[in-house]
Image: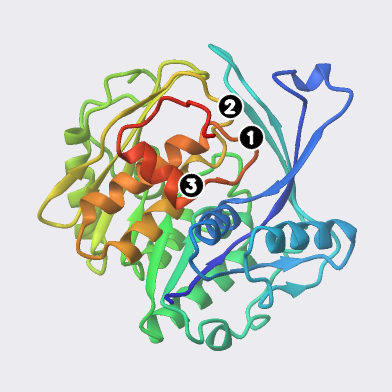
Amino acid sequence: MKKVVTFGEIMLRLSPPGFLRFSQASSFDVVYGGGEANVAVSLANYGIPVDFVTRLPHNDLGHCALMELRKRGVGTDKIIFGGDRLGIYFLETGAVSRASKVVYDRAHSAMAKIRKGMLDWDQVFDGVEWFHWTGITPAISQGAADVCLEAVQAASKNGITISADLNYRTKLWKYDGDREAIMTELTSYCDIILGNEEDAEKHFGIKPEGLDITTQGENVKAEAFLSVCKQMMEKFPKAKKVITTLRGSISASHNSWAGVLYDGNTMFKSPEYQITHIVDRVGGGDSFMGGLIYGLLTYPADDQKALDFATAASCLKHTIKGDANLVTVEEVQKLMKGDASGRVAR
């Protein structure tokens, strides 16, 4: 069966219970997550063999993160150990007109201090068909960016399909690296590129015409992104598909959700879902990417079906607490067929 590798940082996530603000919290709920780890968990749930590659501290928290990955069926034998601490992020969950907030505490983490030569990428990629990275990893540190470049170069040399979720994070990129140059070089190796309108603009200065992402509300039009997709393919000629999610933010609790995929000739659009009660939107994009990789591997001749699977999978993620999308193929297919009733299965 086709094997996938993802590379990035898994973190300890600490959240006040329910919808409490940080200032109200006397305790925190604990989960483990991170963009590339979340993609790996999705794929494992769908039965795709997948390894997650990272660097963890050799302490209790590092081993707890390792156990969480193993519990979800993710391969961990390529993970290396070193450094003193696991990255942490704090999440305050928003509601209605109050947005969620994230505070990062990941400076000097084991992953932030990774360096070139620590991983044998030819060994990591033995028997692998697909490699996935995100724009979060090179944003952590120069060392993480350097190792990410090592990875995409090795994957390209080995003929492996490479995907990226551009994932711009305004609270990262604190070191002196040239973000546009770093992201341009990394993305030039990619066959599959996922990014929303903010990612394309912030990383490459590419933007759709006549769209304000802070006021778009329900009026998200797929056609507005066609120019973005075309510009991305012009900038990155290796890319075979450019994909974006379409999130209409009516409020923190109510979003519309869809996706589009452009293959250089045709623009495919998924059905649009109205998510009227969001349980946890963190990891929504990761769940889309996990669903997309599964879809493109499972339905290689049907981009529409792959896109529809990704969108339905990520719609379901918004109902699940935590970073990872803990749904099955059967549950996603049920929603794809139009069954959104939520009736008890018994």
Calculate the distance from the C-alpha at mark 1 to the C-alpha at mark 2: 6 Å
Which kind of residue does numbered mark 3 sit on? Ser
Q: How is the image coloured?
A: rainbow
Q: Quadrant of the C terminus?
A: top right
**Which residue in the structure is indicated by mark 2?**
279
Q: Quick check: marks 1 and 2 in contact, CB under 8 Å? A: yes
Is residue 38 left or right of 1 when viewed as pictured?
A: right
Q: Is residue 286 above or below residue 338?
A: below
- Marks 1 and 3, the one that precedes in the sequence: 3
Extreme-front residue of the structure: 346
Which kind of residue does numbered mark 2 sit on? Val
Q: Which mark is residue 287?
A: 3
Residue 205 seen in the current view? no
Instruction: Please report the residue visible at 66 percent of the width from the left and 77 percent of the height from the top.
Output: 78
Which picture quadrant has residue 20?
top right
Q: Local crowd at mark 2 within 10 Å, few (<14), some, or many (≥20)?
A: some
